[in-house]
Amino acid sequence: MKYNSIRKLKSHLMISLIIIIFIIALTPVFHLIISIVVRGVMVISRNFPRIFIDIRPIPGSKEIGGIGPYIFGSLLLTAIASAISIPIAIGAAIFTSEALSSRERSLGRITRLFSHMLIEFPTIIIGIAIYGILTLINNVFGVSIPRFSALSGVIALTLIATPYIFSQVEDSLKGIPVYIREAVYSIGISRLKASIILLRYIKSALFASITIGISRMLGETASLLFTAFGSDYYTYTDPQFLLKPIGTLTLAIYNFATSPYENWVDLSWAAAFVLLILTLSLFILSRVIVRR
């Protein structure tokens, strides 16, 4: 009896210790979220709803201005990069998971290796690489391609999001029971139609992977410093807006948070709040889809 009491005591102590460590670890996260919500709402309330449309204010003035161009830029880059990366990632995942011949399996291993390498790369390296490649093309071939542009930002976000979506979709396809896969192929349909049926089987995981990839793009900063570069104004009125620098919420936070001007610092809190709401909305959406 005494031995069992000691074991129970040790068990309760360890559980209590784990809970305490868990609470300590989450405290900074909750403090950050609460700070962003409180400060962000206070700033937004000063110019609501114009803050979601207006451009940045004059530095050092009493105006609060707005973050309209940065919201537009984030949504535009994410939408275009998603339209490119999602089909590529899903197609590559189908190819690697459904490879039959030895040649296809070899290409699948190369694709998987390249994807894992991109995931491990610091995203700032991807931005620098794109900048360097565009510079090389300009110097060697004489083709003038803007290094700081929305197009460069789209390329960077595509390279960042594609391997994430690919890896998760591939794992989901590999997790399909063998009997279901055999039943699908036994019908005698083409590999394309069979792949579509298998994708329907993992649709919850598929949508969750896509939302995670989109969240990854929305929160990206480092690579955009060398590609999208940033802009404080709307660029959609220019016919060649994809070849012009463009601002995003993350770049606005980076630039305004380190500014000596109080109204710009306040604007960074508003941008952080909007970005937090967008990211949390995607996270909640992915959890709801997975549970279904």
Image (spheres, rainbow, N blue to C red):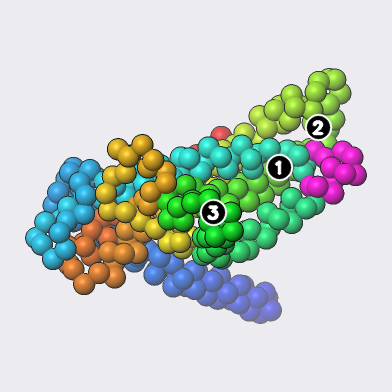
| Residue in view at x 35 percent, y 64 percent | 254
Q: Nearer the viewer, residue 137 or 155?
A: 137
Which residue is identified by label 2? 181
Mark 3 neighbour class, 10 Å CA radius: few under 14, some 14 to 19, many 20 or more: few
Q: Amino acid at mark 3?
A: Gly
Locate residue 237: give its quadrant.
top left
Taking the image as shown, residue 9 lies to the left or right of residue 151, namely right
At mark 1, the secondary structure is: helix
At mark 2, the secondary structure is: helix
The C terminus: image quadrant:
top right
Image position, residue 27 (x, y; %)? 39, 69
Marks 2/1: CA–CA distance? 15 Å
Q: Is residue 290 visible?
A: no
- Inspect the magenta stretch and tell me whether residue 88 lies in it: no
| Residue in view at x 63 percent, y 58 percent | 118
Which residue is identified by label 1? 93
Numbered label tally: 3
Which residue is identified by label 3? 142
